[in-house]
Image: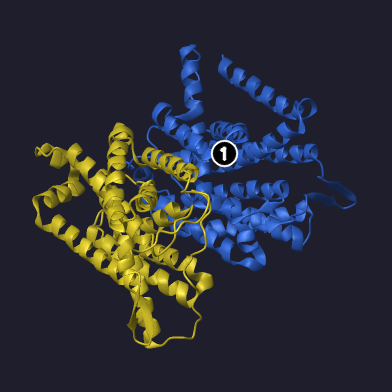
Chain colours: A yellow, B blue
Amino acid sequence: MGRPVRSPLPRIPMLNLTPDFLLIQLLNGLSSGVLLFLISAGLSIIFGMMDVINLAHGSFYMLGAYFGLTILRVTQSFWLALILAPLLVALLGLAGERFLLRPLKGRGHLDQVLLTFGVALVLADLVLAVPGWGGTVRALPAPPELAGSIPIGKGQYPVYRLFAIGVGLLLALILGLIITRTQIGAIVRAGVADAEMASGLGINISLVFSLVFAVGAALAAFGGVMTAPIVSLQPGMDADTLIRALIVVVVGGLGTLRGAFWGSLLIGEVDNFGRALLPDYALFSIYVIMAVVLLLRPAGLFGRKT
Amino acid sequence: MPRQTEILWAIAIAIVLALIALPFVESTYVVTTVTEILIFAIFAMSLDLLIGYTGLVSFGHAAFFGIGAYAAGYLAQMLSPNFLVYLPLALLITAACALVIGFFSIRVSGVYFLMLTLAFSQMVYAIAFNWTDVTGGSNGLSGIPRPQIELFSLQWSFEDEISRYFLVLAFFLLSYAALRAVVRSQFGHVLVGIRENETRLRAIGYDTARFKLAAFVIAGIFAGVAGVLYAGFNRFVSPGEVYWSASGQVLIMVIIGGAGTLVGPALGAALVLALQNVVSSSTERWSTIMGLIFILFVFAARFGIIGLIAQIMEGMAVRLRPALPKEINGHPPN
């Protein structure tokens, strides 16, 4: 887990509220928001369906980024890293679900929280131990074809961030369509609503659990590789991201994809504008949002009242 | 007739005597380690008042340890190194923070409580990280003076390890006695009632929110006691003390030791810190070992060390039953 490191984003002086500045900050917030969605989507659906708060979800994100780093070093291809790293992490997630989580079924939240916290500790430490990974801040550069900037207003904006926004929105759309329009989505929704009932209707719910867990892990890892060119890889990135994703899930409502999406965008923008306008208080802004939402709407913005 | 009570008293007295004799037979290294263990034992016991007795799983308890430690460190430097001056002030600050955070947190329950306490503790972390004038920011607060006690013409400074050990031991015993009195009082029984069935307690007419808030503040104060002692013992406080992994670690101590008892968390603190000392002297992979132990305990020993001991004792046909919580982590039976 380690100590978190101050955000590598540059500090932007206040009182510079030109339209260009606002647009660029809006885009920055949007890009971190959609990337956050990739992590929080899995966390939220896994919680909604399996009743598991997976504190190792940030570790999937971190492992994705570091696997991506190694694949990039070996193959020199960002795109291979983007595809292979999530697959590897999905396999890990599958194994973790099968051999660690499933035996704890029906044990309640606390045991799962403890188990996944233990796993997160081990994974964070292992990353430190792997040569070429831990120990220092690592950079995973954007692919050369997306490395430049394009002019926006009077300034320049990195192409890669726009690409990230596009990919994130596209994936959100695809996930949304899968959940709302396909039979698999219907099964997942049935599992979120009442896993036992779904199982009673002849759905192989433990298979669905495994798949959802693996897909959630892969999405987090994909988010890890996608985010790596924007913020560098460093110890503590797992915890940092996990806590953000937890806040998104709580703000948006546990178990809803829509909540994870709008929650991510909200947290992404608030966090980004917080950092840009009030750098000294930026760490607060998202916690304040979370506390306020929990007090006004305990089930989250899109959560069902229980 | 009450043979088991007598046995337990004998064990308790033996442990206290052993703790008093320790500095005279063991090296400074051991004394320092045990001092740290006793500090974290207070911290873990305070958390167990919430988890084991009230059924509120807080993932942000390090906030109050940190607030106590930072307040003590700051006051000792700026106001007076007199322990009798800065201890009550630091505890007052901790209690005030616990009152505010508790007021908001207890309005939600279950997983939401866990996450809200986590969020509040991260806010405290953010303050520790950013309020450089008071906390030293990322560098932490260093150069905290050793505790001294000045009362009228009496002066006592805790410069050496052994006198500090006795100071901490005294506070450990006092805290244990106080928390024991709390959980055995009628108030404590109401807390257990909240853990078992809050709805029913409300129906009987208890204002459970008020009880939960009181438990939260008491737990916060004792975490603050541990933090104040830590500041004088370590002479350095960093934001890491408030970070969520610190809250996780004390949660581990409670669970590994056995929630729902006071001795359990103290044993958990001893096991975790003793292991940390042994393991980290031979390998850098302390976190891995810690995580693995943790996973092992979740699978193999649900009720922690106390649960294991109880099983063994029961096997020996001694009827010793610590108040094992039936289900402290599932959904409250509404």
Q: Does residue A182 appear to the left or right of B324 in the view shown? A: left
Q: How far from the left and from the top, in percent, is residue B261? A: 52, 33
Q: Amino acid at mark 1?
A: Glu
Q: Is residue B269 above or below residue A278?
A: above
Q: How far from the left and from the top, in percent, is residue B269? A: 58, 36
Q: Which residue is mark 1?
A: B284
Seen at 41% across and 32% down, the residue is: B298
Seen at 18% across and 42% down, the residue is: A208
Q: Is residue B323 visible?
A: no
**Helix, strand, or loop for circle 1?**
loop
| Residue B69 or residue B262, whichever sits in front | B69
Q: How far from the left and from the top, in percent, is residue A139? A: 44, 59
**Callout 1: residue from which chain?**
B
| Residue B39 or residue A118, whichever sits in front | A118
Q: Is residue B324 above or below residue A238?
A: above
Q: Does residue B175 appear to the left or right of B242 in the view shown? A: right
Q: Quadrant of the C terminus of chain B?
A: top left
Q: Is residue A228 above or below residue B252?
A: below
Seen at 56% across and 35% down, the residue is: B272
Q: How far from the left and from the top, in percent, is residue A113? A: 39, 42
